[in-house]
């Protein structure tokens, strides 16, 4: 009886975790429909949004691929630079004063302001969008990597020093493994930021991508198209974060 009661108590939180978001989404959907019926210029009915997606799935997949490829390329570049610079700052403290102000300046500069200059410099191709995505992903990865690399156990560091371990050995066998949770936390933020940066950079200078689709829909007041593009971008970002979570579980289990 006690085991059954314990199983029953364990099942309730799982059910609550499943039902809670479902209830919230149902309430949001009901509120959406009310606004769509009473304030038609603000939101389209959900049915028209789904019909728009069902009518042209290939159109949205093509534009999504353009945005996603730029976001993933930018994420890979920005995250790699962020981790490398974090490693250098940890080992050479003098670089902190030189690198962090530049990183913060890049982070606070609006990507909408950067995009035109990049288009002038590199032309109407994927390069400006990849650069904006890389800039967006860079700082979250740098800050989290710095935090993780510095959060090593002092006693473990003393053991490595007593064994005359080199900096590379200490980095590979101590700092990087202990910083994995921070690195993956940074990756979750960075990949979402790269997706946002890629979309925003497409607001001008291109006819392809989710950002361009949103601008096109705005120009022609096509609310269903606009909201399909917005939903696709949000779901894609959630999917990318989920992939990072899966990678974290696999890597930390292996490590």
Image (cartoon, helix red, strand yellow):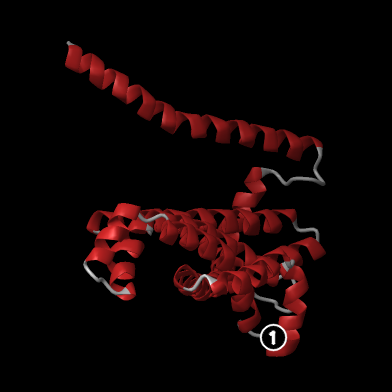
Of all residues, the one furthest to the front in this rendering is 162
Q: Is residue 222 left or right of residue 23?
A: right
* Residue 1 figure quarter: top left
Residue 191 shows in this picture: yes
Above-or-below relation of 240 to 61 = above
Query: Percent x, y for residue 141?
Result: 51, 64
* Residue 167 figure quarter: bottom left
Query: Looking at the rendering, in which quadrant would you find the C terminus?
Result: bottom left
Residue 65 shows in this picture: no
Query: Percent x, y for residue 103?
Result: 63, 69
Q: Is residue 234 left or right of residue 163?
A: right
Query: Percent x, y for residue 81?
Result: 51, 75
Q: Which residue is mark 1?
A: 124
Seen at 60% across and 73% down, the residue is 99
Seen at 50% across and 53% down, the residue is 238
Seen at 28% across and 72% down, the residue is 169
Tag 1, which secondary structure? loop
Query: Percent x, y for residue 116?
Result: 77, 79
């Amino acid at each position: 009886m006690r085991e059954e009661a314990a199983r029953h108590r364990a099942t309730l939180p799982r059910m609550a975790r499943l039902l809670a978001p479902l209830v919230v989404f149902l309430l949001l959907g009901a509120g959406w429909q009310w606004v769509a019926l009473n304030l038609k210029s603000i939101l389209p009915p959900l049915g028209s949004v789904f019909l728009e997606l069902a009518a042209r799935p290939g159109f949205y997949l093509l534009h999504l691929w353009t945005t996603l490829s730029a976001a993933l390329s930018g994420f890979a570049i920005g995250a790699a630079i962020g981790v490398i610079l974090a490693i250098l700052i940890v080992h050479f403290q003098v670089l902190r004063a030189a690198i962090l102000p530049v990183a913060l300046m890049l982070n606070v500069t609006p990507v909408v302001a950067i995009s035109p200059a990049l288009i002038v410099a590199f032309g109407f191709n994927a390069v400006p969008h990849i650069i904006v995505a890389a800039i967006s992903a860079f700082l979250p990865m740098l800050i989290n990597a710095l935090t993780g690399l510095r959060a090593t156990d002092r006693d473990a560091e003393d053991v490595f020093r007593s064994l005359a371990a080199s900096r590379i050995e200490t980095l590979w066998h101590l700092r990087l493994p202990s910083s994995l949770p921070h690195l993956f936390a940074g990756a979750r933020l960075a990949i979402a930021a790269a997706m946002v940066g890629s979309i925003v950079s497409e607001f001008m200078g291109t006819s392809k991508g989710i950002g361009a689709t949103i601008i096109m829909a705005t120009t022609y007041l096509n609310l269903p198209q606009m909201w399909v593009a917005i939903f696709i971008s949000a779901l894609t970002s959630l999917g990318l974060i989920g992939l990072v979570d899966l990678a974290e579980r696999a890597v930390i289990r292996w490590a």
